[in-house]
Amino acid sequence: MIVLEREPLWKWTTLRIGGPADRLVFPESPEELAPLMERRPFILGGGSNLLAADAGIRGDVVCLAKGFARVEIVQRRGGMARVYAGAGARLARLAAACYRAGLTGMEFALGIPGLVGGALIMNAGTGEGEMKDVVERVTVMERGGAQREIAVDECGFAYRASALAARGVVTGAFLRLGEGERETIRQTMRRLQRARLAAQPLDLPSAGSVFKNPPGESAWRLIAQAGLRGARVGGAQVSEKHANFIVNTGGATAKDVVALMETIERRVKATSGVTLEREIRLAGDFSADGAR
Ligand SMILES: Cc1cc2nc3c(=O)[nH]c(=O)nc-3n(C[C@H](O)[C@H](O)[C@H](O)COP(=O)(O)OP(=O)(O)OC[C@H]3O[C@@H](n4cnc5c(N)ncnc54)[C@H](O)[C@@H]3O)c2cc1C
């Protein structure tokens, strides 16, 4: 089991921000994970929806990326397939494996960064589909170390949310996918990737959409209407290309990003009356200024 002491979290987040974790631990089996659960660790996925504090995270941070990454077709029958995906597998690797096997349903996930575990917690997705559409059962390890399976209707899946974190660590999921035409799957993936490249600032570090879309509205439109495209605090900037992305233009701190998010929340409320809800998750202690 790999254990990194005082490991800077900016190395493990797509925003490239975050101070040290006391210990970053990579268990490779349920037997290694179980005793770690007693220490109530923070669970890190691919760090693609996270703002980690400048002060870092005290105690253990556990990441399943080095083990728990199995992707396997466990059954194939009558035009359907059941696939097991470990929480530590990259979501894009799962999507690619499904394409290669001629299975349809995961096309939406190809361009979403992060791991299967994080995608389940967040019910990650796009207008073309989300995790809850393909999940049959989620496997978790509870705080006491017991392993459980949770049926999809007990996962509390909602728009970019689930109730899974309260159940412990997500270790994987059984997915239900359909047989498809490889060429059709490939074309759908290419179309979605092109649309993503055109719409998102993928040349700079970010954590994707910062705010959830309010019902019937787009967060980016409200932020743009508030005149905040290009607004900045320190190294953090509202993307010119996609106003619901905050990008790290170099040397941004978590404090910069929080200040920018608060400005957005205030200005959008003032201009449109809408209270934005954060999609991005904060990790660590934000009460102190926490210089790096
Ligand atoms: C360029 C870019 C584009 C993006 N596009 C999209 C998009 O189209 N759609 C979309 O939905 N999201 C998108 N995102 C956001 C992000 O990729 C997703 O939310 C992703 O599913 C997060 O997964 P992760 O593994 O990185 O989770 P992390 O960011 O590491 O963690 C997210 C939360 O889940 C918890 N967690 C992670 N793994 C586990 C586990 N195994 N058990 C228990 N808790 C866990 C963490 O503690 C944290 O609270 C984008 C991000 C970027 C940077």
Image (cartoon, rainbow, N blue to C red):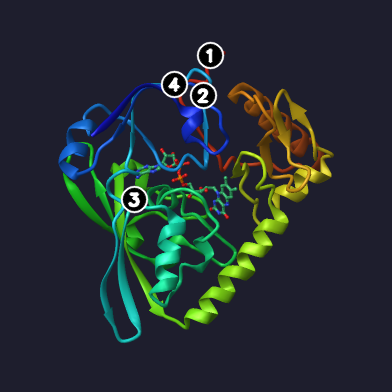
Does any atom of ligand 1 lie closer than 8 Å to the CB of label 2? Answer: no
Q: What's the residue type where badge 1 is placed? A: Gly
Q: Quadrant of residue 83?
A: bottom left
> Which residue bears the numbered disc 3?
87
Judge from the rendering whether residue 83 lies leftward or rightward of residue 125; answer left or right.
left
Q: Disc 4 and disc 1: Cα gap in Å?
A: 11 Å
Of circles 2 and 4, the one toward us is: 4
Closer to the camera in the image, 273 or 285: 285
Q: What's the residue type where badge 2 is placed? A: Ala
Q: Disc 1 and disc 3: Cα gap in Å?
A: 31 Å
Q: Few, some or many C-alpha atoms within 10 Å of disc 3 (few <14, some 14-19, many ≥20)?
A: many
Mark 4–mark 1 contact, CB under 8 Å?
no
Which residue sits at x=60%, y=64%? Answer: 127
Q: Disc 2 and disc 3: Cα gap in Å?
A: 24 Å
Please report whichever mark, 4 or 1, sits nearer to the chain's N-terminal start: 4
Per the rendering, the mark at residue 20 is 4
Q: What's the residue type where badge 4 is placed? A: Pro
Please report whichever mark, 3 or 4, sits nearer to the chain's N-terminal start: 4
Judge from the rendering whether residue 226 lies leftward or rightward of residue 255; answer left or right.
right
> Which residue bears the numbered disc 1?
290
Q: Disc 2 and disc 4: Cα gap in Å?
A: 9 Å
